[in-house]
Image (cartoon, rainbow, N blue to C red):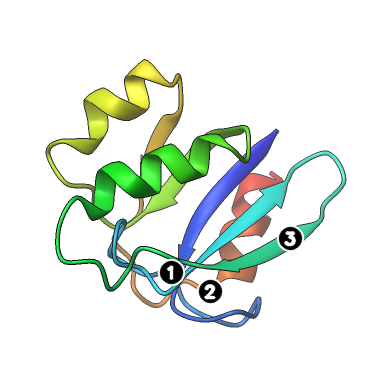
Amino acid sequence: MIVAITSTGNSLESFIDPRFGRCSYFVFYNTETKESVFQSNPFKDNDEGVGVDVVEWITTFSCSKIVSGQFGMKIKPLLDESRIQLILDNDPKLTIRQIINLLDH
């Protein structure tokens, strides 16, 4: 299963980014192979429609879940349509490594 995690940076020691559409990076974590791939968010600086663009982009990675601090109101129906589960985590002190460890247990 692929899990997308919003991240402030491109390392396992980076923190979860509370912003979904405007996060700096996404980490695509494969729970079977334990591989983490960091991708810069290509839409973070767009003027509008960022969340919708991000959802369309994320679906190309075959994600089953997304972990972020918050999601905009338009996002939940789009993710429901794509059968992607939302996981809210508002703890800004959690590192990507800690989130991955929680996903593995």
Expressed as whole percent of the image width and height from the top left, the position of residue 71 reads 23, 48
Q: Which residue type carries mark 1?
A: Ile
Amino acid on which disc 3 is placed: Ser
- The numbered mark at residue 16 is 1
How many labels sit on residues?
3
Q: Earlier in the sequence, mark 2 or mark 1?
A: 1
Q: Residue at x 43, y 29 (%)?
A: 85
Label drawn at residue 36: 3
Q: Earlier in the sequence, mark 1 or mark 3?
A: 1
Which image quarter: residue 80? top left
What is the distance, in whole Å, between disc 1 and disc 3 at their CAs? 14 Å
Q: Is residue 14 toward the left or the right of residue 83 in the image?
A: right
Quadrant where the C terminus is found in the figure? top right
Is residue 11 placed above or below 68 in the rendered structure?
below
Q: Residue at x 33, y 47 (%)?
A: 53
Q: Position of residue 72 (x, y in %)?
A: 16, 46
Question: Contact (CB < 8 A) between labels 2 and 1?
Answer: yes
Q: Residue at x 38, y 49 (%)?
A: 54
Q: Residue furthest front?
A: 47
Q: The residue tagged with tag 2: helix, strand or loop? A: loop
**Quarter residue 12 falls in:** bottom right
Tell me if mark 1 has few (under 14), some (14-19) or many (20+) residues whose alpha carbon lies within 10 angstroms of its own.
many
Q: Nearer the viewer, mark 1 or mark 3?
A: 3
Badge 2 is on which residue? 95
Query: Residue 2 location, x and y as percent?
Result: 66, 39
Q: Separation of disc 3 and disc 2 at Cα?
A: 13 Å
